[in-house]
Image (spheres, helix red, strand yellow):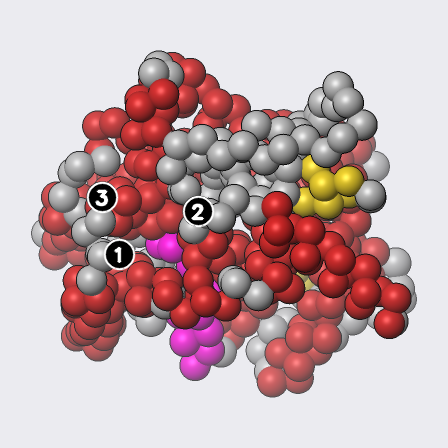
Amino acid sequence: MRKLRARWGVLAEAVDSATPPDRDRAVDALRAFAILGVVLGHWLVTALTTADGGLSNTSPLAHMSRLAPVSWVFQTLAVFFLVGGHVAARGYASARARGDSYRTWVGQRLGRLFRPVAAVLTLWAVAAGGMLIGGVELSTVQTLVKLVLSPLWFLLVFAVLTAATPLVARLSPLWPLAVVAGVDLWRFGLDGPEWAGWINVAAGWLVPYTLGAAWSRGAFARRGPAVLLLAAGSTATAALILWGGYPASMVGVPGAPISNLNPPTLAAVAFGLAQCGLALLVREPLARAMRRPAAWAKVALVNLSAMTIFLWHQTAMMAVTALGLLLPTDLPGLHTVPDSAEWIAARLLWLPVFAAALTLCWAAFRTYEQGRRRKPSTPRPSPVRASGTVAGSSVRASGTAAGSPVPTGPRVVPAQEITHA
């Protein structure tokens, strides 16, 4: 254990010393916390049960509505889009300053965003075909594939907003917020068609994205606007839940008549405003915490494999669940109905097992995110060369990361800027 701690200390010091001094570490910390929030949230509120034969998807929120506040902690998508808008706006400004064309800039960003997706789709296409040939019930296969593919909507929306950055970077968040309010009034107040809600998929997430772009222009240099966001968002969310008829859960609940997330409602957007305000308020404490090499190294390593973690965390959970089916009895917290405190306690014990499975997925598929490493022309370490601004910089090197280098063996391998959520 002592040797392990010593090696981690060396790794952390190497990551810290090789990070560009002007790197905005708080941005990377917010992104890492948002990623981990999504992962833990899915692992806690998604349950695959054998109650009806085969595997069916349910949620403890469907059986224990008092757990709705849990979703307030782990539904962190607004922070994703806040950071994404901030990084994209600064990155595009840096690209223009360097003379890069829009086509070059957007091609690089979207390429890094979607390259890891091919591995997930290929594996699950083969797995789904194998399960059907092997006689697995169609409903079970549909449940598993839906859990894998459902997070990909986020990537599609994020890609569209990224591509539209030059058009929306200076858009006031009030405009998409007004669209969301109008759509909800149409749907819920005037009995409009259900399909109208899908307009909010773009408009709802455009609100935090444009806030991030405003952040890149210095709109939140003082604490006042962030405090206003937190206060107004919290007040509006509470009012919409208590008197507006919106559900308390900020994630979808199987069987619920209204989902705050699919598509986003005004309540979800208001809650996202509060989240963004809080995120902007904790920037300085995060920046101070990230000065510690051990803390910064953990954040940098999460960002290094952000897409791999995001894309494979559901697969890791399902792999553990499937392996558990080999035993002659249903395992508490894994296959049983999530309707009791005992299920919650058991599920918490499964989290380290899910994490171990995710680590195996990471080891197998992280190269799809990081790309092929170039062979160095000399045995000497490659220098870190930052260009452009902090959030929009590009570090020329092998691998991908949160803009910080990651040691591999005796030499430090600098890493590219992570350009996705």
| Residues packed near mark 1 inside 10 Å, few (<14), some (14 to 19) or many (20 plus) | many
Whether label 2 touches label 3, CB < 8 Å = no
Question: Who is closer to the viewer here, 267 or 295?
Answer: 295
Residue that label 1 marks: 269
Say which residue appears at 68% left-offset and 45% top-offset. Answer: 406
x then y, percent, for residue 311: 60, 43
Amino acid at dot 1 = Val
In what quadrant of the picture does the N terminus appear? Answer: bottom right
Which stretch did the figure color magenta?
Answer: 66-81
Compared with residue 405, is residue 279 higher up or lower down, i.e. above or below? below
Amino acid at dot 3 = Arg
Query: What kind of element bears circle 1?
Result: helix
Residue that label 2 marks: 22
Question: Who is closer to the viewer here, 261 or 91?
Answer: 91
**CA–CA distance between discs 3 and 1?**
22 Å
Q: Of the numbered discs in the image, which one, if any, rests on residue 217?
A: 3
